[in-house]
């Protein structure tokens, strides 16, 4: 077949229109392009294309509402804006099983959501994230892990995260509490030198920033203050997998022998 264009000088527009399809046909969530000579043998192929265009963030809401009958309360969870933080938290807790910086597929995403849903940690995080712009991914990681250890209904821990979200701290004394160390460091960069590092999602940076958060969370929960981090502070996050939970069998046994 031979196509004859009246205005030959504009033929290239046929090749450059794809990025602007949504401008011509607005109002749809997904757009799939098939060339005019494409022959579709199985409708499943179109469905697979549609699923492939969906980002992991967009899948979170569907998994939570569809599989777990849970409707997110916060905008941040509804939009799936926790994935880097959740994935890193999963890596800290199960480094052999979850050892990739990105999620491979929908099944992996569902498994990670399930890990935190079953323990009530994701629901608690959802309730705490009232101001989405205040929650960087290291905060998401540390919050999930601390909720796992201290319990999702621990009121002291919940209050601490509310104060962190508000950026509240007391800098008048020489020895600061955990909330003050965290909020001030995330404002100025503190020992990390640059505040952008505190919010960075690279795993090597998160190894340190999440450890810093968990170190001062432990201090706050034990009513301890300090002027700086102590020895082995940077190992706290990686050692978290060995803790179990505060009210778990191991901790219960230790409390009996004390």
Image: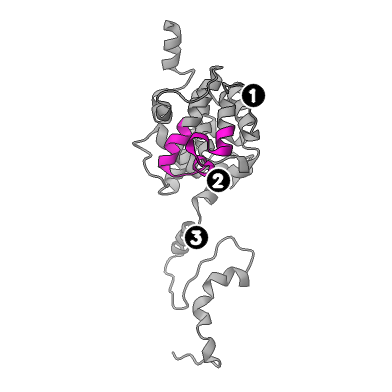
Question: What is the number of the mark on residue 50?
Answer: 3
Is label 1 or label 2 in front? 1
Q: Secondary structure at mark 1?
A: loop
Question: Which is more toward the observer, 179 or 159?
Answer: 179
Distance between the alpha carbons at the discs numbered 3 and 2: 21 Å
Question: What is the number of the mark on residue 81?
Answer: 2
Above or below residue 244? Residue 36 is below
Q: Which residue occupies the extreme top position in the image? A: 257
Question: Which is more toward the observer, 173 or 160?
Answer: 173
Is label 3 or label 1 in front? 1
Q: Main secondary structure of the magenta part?
A: helix
Q: Which residue is mark 1?
A: 172
Q: Secondary structure at mark 3?
A: helix
Q: Earlier in the sequence, mark 3 or mark 1?
A: 3
Question: Which is more toward the observer, 168 or 251?
Answer: 168
Residue beneath the point at 45% across and 91% down: 2
Residue 169 picture location, percent across and down = 63, 28
Residue 208 picture location, percent across and down = 44, 35
Question: What is the number of the mark on residue 80?
Answer: none
Distance between the alpha carbons at the discs numbered 3 and 1: 56 Å
Asked where in the image residue 234 lies, by quadrant, the reply is top left
């Amino acid at each position: 077949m031979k196509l004859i264009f009246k205005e030959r000088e504009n033929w290239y527009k046929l090749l450059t229109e794809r990025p602007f399809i949504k401008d011509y046909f607005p109002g749809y969530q997904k757009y799939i392009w098939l060339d005019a000579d494409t022959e579709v043998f199985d409708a499943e192929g179109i469905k697979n294309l549609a699923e492939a265009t969906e980002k992991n963030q967009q899948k979170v809401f569907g998994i939570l509402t569809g599989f777990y009958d849970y409707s997110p309360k916060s905008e941040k969870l509804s939009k799936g804006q926790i994935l880097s933080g959740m994935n890193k938290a999963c890596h800290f807790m199960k480094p052999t099983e979850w050892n990739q910086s990105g999620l491979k597929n929908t099944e992996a995403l569902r498994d990670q959501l399930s890990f935190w849903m079953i323990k009530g940690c994701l629901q608690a995080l959802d309730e705490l994230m009232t101001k989405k712009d205040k929650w960087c991914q290291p905060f998401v990681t540390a919050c999930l892990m601390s909720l796992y250890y201290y319990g999702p209904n621990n009121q002291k821990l919940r209050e601490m995260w509310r104060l962190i979200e508000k950026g509240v701290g007391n800098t008048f004394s020489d020895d600061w509490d955990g909330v003050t160390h965290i909020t001030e460091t995330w404002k100025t960069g503190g020992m990390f030198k640059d505040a952008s590092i505190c919010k960075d999602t690279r795993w090597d940076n998160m190894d340190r920033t999440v450890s810093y958060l968990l170190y001062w969370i432990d201090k706050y929960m034990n009513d301890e203050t300090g002027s700086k981090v102590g020895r082995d502070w940077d190992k706290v996050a990686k050692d978290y997998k060995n803790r179990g939970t505060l009210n778990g069998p191991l901790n219960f046994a230790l409390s009996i022998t004390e």
